[in-house]
Amino acid sequence: MKFYLTLLVLPFAFWRCNAQTNSEMSGSSMDFETYNPPSSLVVPEHPLTRAKFPFIDVHNHQFGMPDMDLSKLASEMDALNMQVMVNLSGRGRGDADHLRRGVENVKKNFPNRFIIFTNISDQGIDEPGYSEKLAQQIEDDFKVGANGLKIYKGLGFNWKDSKGNRIPVDDPRLDAAWAKCGELGIPVLIHSADPKQFWEPFDANNERWLELKTHPGRKRSDTNPAPFDQIIREQHNVFRNHRNTTFINAHMGWMANDLAKLGKHLDENPNVNVEIGAIIAELGRQPRAAKEFFIKYQDRVLFGKDAYNPEEYYTYFRVLETADEYFPYYKKYHAFWPMYGLNLPDEVLKKLYYKNALRIVPNIDGSAFPD
């Protein structure tokens, strides 16, 4: 009898053991990129899809603006309460004609909704008269309708002279560009380097490990193309050497994770402002310190987003406007930590959303803003 009972029990025991093993394996074999459990925390939630006040996005890229049907984009902006978008890619990947056609499209269809910046390149940097031609190009673009200059991170990264040498951000041949912008009263929005963690060892101590694993091309080193601190130092040299030019330091100068350092940077450089594109995750994990920073430097910070994706603005609104706790960021590989709201005062929000941009960027129609 015992023999027959054993025969009956063994299949069930085997199935139970096998099911347990499969269950354990489904967890143990899961990689870190996949692990993203929903929070069990129950707290008040106030998700937002629209900004409290009309805002100006000073950091956006619309490479196809000359041939774009702007009505769809304007409709999406309306839903977000974005009154004005600054397209930093005025010359696109092209030339002066690209800028001219983009300005014409805007003037014809939505003259009060878009502002366009121009761009420069290293083409002909070793040729005689490069600096003079650069200054003339900026003046010509300004007459066409450009209201600022955007510098991509290619300067300091992959701009090279005819001998293959890296062109530093503070190369004296570019001084004419910064001076001309100061003369014309237009700002320079400049992006130099990338997050410092991209230069650090790719190991368990790197806070950007997941991003570097999923985007290995972002890994940098002291020879690819230069040390992080050197590139940032070159950028800051430009700020110090051109006090009469207004600069907008993109991505909070990659100092949003050290707001005391960023504050010192602003104190030492009164011609420098910052924008918050692509670094909201840094602010959302230090709500008390970030709120204090925004209140103290409320006249120096502008709203920017960078890559255009309407749904990603929602996280920005929620971090800036609410007191919500422990809510997710929209890109796990950027930040696997949760966000907290800063609950900024209305007057600070107004300066961040539009007042500072109205003061710094010329020719924005201010009639659609509250005060």
Image: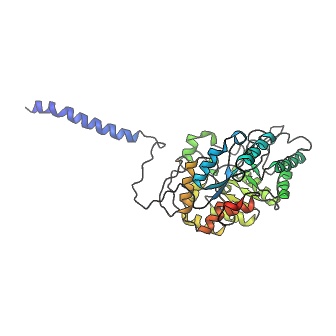
Residue 74 appearing in the image: yes
Residue 240: % across, % down = 80, 60
Q: Is residue 281 above or below residue 109?
A: below
Q: Residue at x 42, y 53 (%)?
A: 39
Q: Quadrant of residue 254?
A: bottom right
Q: Is residue 210 above or below residue 346?
A: above
Residue 292: % across, % down = 60, 68
Q: Is residue 291 above or below residue 16?
A: below
Q: Is residue 303 above or below residue 125?
A: below
Residue 152 appearing in the image: no
- Quarter of the image with the N terminus is top left
Outermost residue to the left: 1
Residue 215: % across, % down = 59, 40
Q: Is residue 346 left or right of residue 117?
A: left
Residue 276: % across, % down = 64, 56
**Residue sitting nearer the eye, 128 or 237:** 128
Count of residue discs: 0
Q: Is residue 290 left or right of residue 274?
A: left
Q: Residue at x 54, y 47 (%)?
A: 331
- Quarter of the image with the C terminus is bottom right
Q: Is residue 45 left or right of residue 203?
A: left
Outermost residue to the front: 108
Q: Quadrant of residue 244?
A: bottom right
The type of colouring in the image is: rainbow
